[in-house]
């Protein structure tokens, strides 16, 4: 059973990577897999979440975002157990994905030959970097390999940061911790750091659906990283998750403010609000212009959904 399953998965992956250029699935296939996204796309079909939402995502509550996704039925979007360069720094971006497998010489030779014919240079672990743009996060399934599974060091890390201004998430390793840490603003969430070079790994999929531990990731997903772990938010849910999480932050801030002022008890705030508290909340929002990033329309919609 395991052999048949592995063979089927390999054949499906080979189908994806042979229908596109240099291990990349076709634009049509990517649009199909992300058909719930109705916004702007890159030329290759990858969803393009607006830059403004990326900035807002870095300010929302991580636990709130996780809960919102689960309430929407998305249970397989979080993975923990990372080593990070800067674990206390939050970063968010759009996923560019890559899938690696243990090296098999005949397949690797064919992949390299085709890639070089199409103008790609060097080894395959550099190819995903060529796709990166500002705001992207390079997400790689390196099948958990650390020793000999170091997908980047300082040189590639520098190139990635110059292209994206962000970082990486690898179910694999990275080398040259000190060199990577010297790249101001760069961050990496990996399984571990190791001094070895990359060996016996080959690129089998580029901008394909991948698995990162317990989570599924599609190209264009919103990648949100903090010390708790990594959350992969489907592109079509990014705005809803961010807006709802912002509303929760405002509601919680109001509750804390009013409890500290002695105006309401914890029981009043922690249960359904009566009309006077609702009105007080709306008036309080008018005084928080610097904190409210929601539009009036978004706020009205959330107020209607709120069960209080």
Image (cartoon, grey):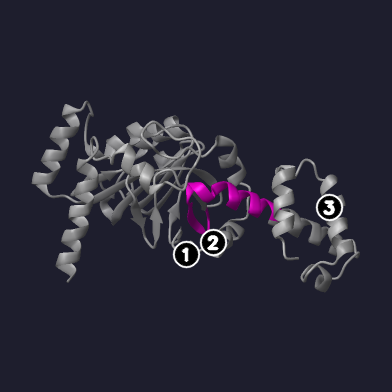
Q: In the picture, which quadrant includes the C terminus?
A: bottom right
Q: CA distance from mark 3 to mark 2?
A: 27 Å
Q: Mark 3 or mark 2, which has the lower sequence index?
A: 2
Foreground residue among 122 and 206? 206
Q: Is residue 134 above or below residue 261?
A: above
Q: Is residue 192 left or right of residue 75?
A: left
Q: Mark 3 or mark 1, which has the lower sequence index?
A: 1
Crowding near pointer 1: few (<14 within 10 Å), some, many (20+)? some
Q: Is residue 257 above or below residue 178?
A: below
Residue 13 % position (x, y): 23, 51
Give the residue number, with chain letter if any, for mark 1.
Answer: 75
Crowding near pointer 3: few (<14 within 10 Å), some, many (20+)? few
Q: CA distance from mark 2 to mark 1?
A: 9 Å
Q: CA distance from mark 3 to mark 1?
A: 33 Å
Residue 282, disc: 3
In the image, is residue 57 part of the stretch drawn in magenta? no
Q: Mark 3 falls on what kind of element? A: helix
Q: Residue at x 82, y 49 (%)?
A: 285
Q: Specify start and end residues of the magenta stretch as a single range.
A: 226-247
Q: Mark 2 falls on what kind of element? A: loop
Crowding near pointer 2: few (<14 within 10 Å), some, many (20+)? few
Q: Mark 1 falls on what kind of element? A: loop
């Amino acid at each position: 059973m395991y052999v048949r399953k592995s063979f089927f998965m390999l054949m499906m992956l080979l189908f994806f990577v042979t229908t596109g250029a240099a291990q990349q699935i076709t634009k049509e296939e990517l649009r199909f897999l992300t058909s719930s996204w109705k916004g702007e796309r890159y030329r290759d079909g990858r969803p393009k979440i607006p830059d403004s939402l990326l900035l807002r995502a870095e300010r929302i509550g991580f636990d709130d975002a996780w809960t919102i996704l689960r309430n929407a039925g998305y249970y397989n979007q979080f993975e923990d157990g990372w080593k990070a360069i800067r674990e206390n720094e939050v970063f968010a971006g759009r996923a560019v994905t890559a899938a690696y497998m243990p090296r098999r010489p005949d397949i690797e030779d064919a992949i390299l030959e085709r890639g070089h014919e199409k103008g790609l240079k060097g080894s395959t672990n550099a190819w995903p970097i060529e796709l990166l743009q500002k705001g992207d996060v390079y997400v790689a399934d390196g099948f958990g390999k650390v020793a000999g599974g170091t997908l980047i060091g300082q040189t590639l890390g520098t190139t990635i940061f110059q292209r994206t201004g962000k970082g990486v998430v690898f179910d694999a390793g990275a080398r040259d911790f000190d060199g990577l840490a010297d790249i101001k603003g760069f961050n990496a969430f990996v399984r571990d750091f190791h001094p070895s070079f990359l060996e016996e790994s080959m690129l089998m999929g580029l901008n394909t659906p991948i698995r990162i531990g317990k989570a599924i990731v599609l190209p264009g997903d919103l990648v949100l990283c903090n010390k708790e772990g990594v959350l992969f938010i489907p592109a079509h849910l990014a705005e809803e998750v961010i807006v709802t999480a912002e509303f929760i932050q405002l509601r919680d801030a109001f509750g804390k403010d009013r409890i500290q002022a002695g105006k309401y008890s914890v029981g009043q705030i922690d249960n359904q609000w009566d009309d006077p508290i609702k009105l007080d909340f709306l008036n309080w929002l008018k005084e928080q212009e610097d904190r409210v990033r929601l539009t009036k329309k978004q706020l009205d919609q959330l107020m209607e959904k709120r069960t209080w």
